[in-house]
Image (cartoon, rainbow, N blue to C red):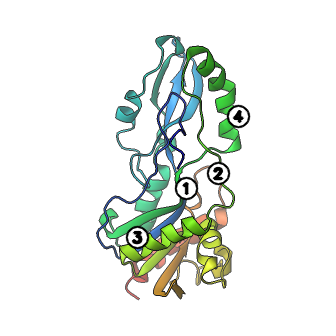
Amino acid sequence: MTPTWTFPFGQPVRRVVQTDRAPKRVFVLGVYASAVHACWKEPNNKTIVKALAVASEPYIFWRGDNAEAIIQQITMPQELGKLSPANRQYNGPSGIALNELILKPLGLGCTDVWLCDLVPHSCVNELQKAAINRTYSGIAESHGLARHTVPPVPLPLTDEIRRREILDELHESGASTLILLGDKPIKWFLRYFDDRWKRLADFGRENESYGRLQRTCIDGKEIAVLPLAHPRQIAKLGRSSVIWYNLHQAWVGNYAGKVLKS
């Protein structure tokens, strides 16, 4: 990772990976790391940006804890206003959804799983970049603040080197089950080893097929694959599909508790 990548107000973009390297039953593969979001207000309390990414999440699939302490570490000129934690919906929603709507229904706790993302660092989309350019870039230059250099979401999401890194983590974890969160981990990881599936819908979009284990072989390792909708879908985070939401709700209520016992 380029060490000069920085968030607005100067915090470095950090690689966010699994820190507990003990063997795990289950390996979870997501898309890309999230960030700590702050609400930026002028000295007169007028909101400039309601949710500005200002730091890397402190751990993978962060659940929003200690956001205020993290934001308080950021220094900024007094005349530019203040930062405070953004609304709860912007800090840790994917981590909370993973824990409450996937792990708990499966009978798992955080210590039972090895977490990984296709892209192990924060990224910025076009809307976020436009907001930063509009509100931050000009004052950063005039006040001698760090330039915003958080990278965009990469395409492709993985290359051969990154897939090898994920494979190494998968082998190290010792996991016998691989949970894939949405289309992207299927498209940018699984299909390179088993091209029967290229997106979540290829596993089926019915109550009788959603969230069922599938057997496959990845890099010589026999493993059970559990494809599930992304946390954005199952928790209605922003734009989401009611179809995947309803399928997941039915799975939680009727089948999730049986999955790892089958």
Amino acid type at mark 4: Ala
Q: Position of residue 84 (x, y in %)?
A: 45, 28
In this orientation, does residue 246 appear? no
Q: What numbered label is drawn on residue 105?
A: 3
Q: Which residue is mark 1?
A: 32
Mark nearer the N terminus (4 vs 1): 1
Residue 168, located in which quarter of the rendered image? Answer: bottom left
Q: Is residue 99 left or right of residue 111?
A: right
Per the rendering, the mark at residue 130 is: 4
Circles 3 and 2: CB atoms closer than 8 Å: no
Tag 2 secondary structure: loop
> Which numbered mark, 4 or 3, is in the foreground of this view?
4
Looking at marks 4 and 3 on the same chain, the residue that comes earlier in the sequence is marked by 3
Tell me whether circle 1 and circle 2 mark residues in contact (CB < 8 Å): yes
Badge number at residue 13 = none
In this view, 8 is above or below 36: above
**Residue type, mark 1 in image:** Tyr
Q: Name the kind of residue labelled 3 in the image.
A: Pro
Q: Badge 4 local density, few (<14 within 10 Å), some, or many (20+)?
A: few
Q: Report crowding for label 2: few under 14, some 14 to 19, many 20 or more residues within 10 A (C-alpha).
A: some
The residue tagged with tag 4: helix, strand or loop?
Answer: helix
**Among the two numbered marks 2 and 4 on one chain, the one whose residue lies closer to the N terminus:** 4
Who comes first in sequence, dot 1 or dot 3?
A: 1
Q: Earlier in the sequence, mark 1 or mark 2?
A: 1
Picture coordinates of residue 105 (x, y %)? Answer: 40, 70
Q: Position of residue 33 (x, y in %)?
A: 51, 52
Q: In terms of depth relative to the viewer, which is nearer, 112 or 73?
A: 73
Label 3 sits on a secondary structure element that is: loop
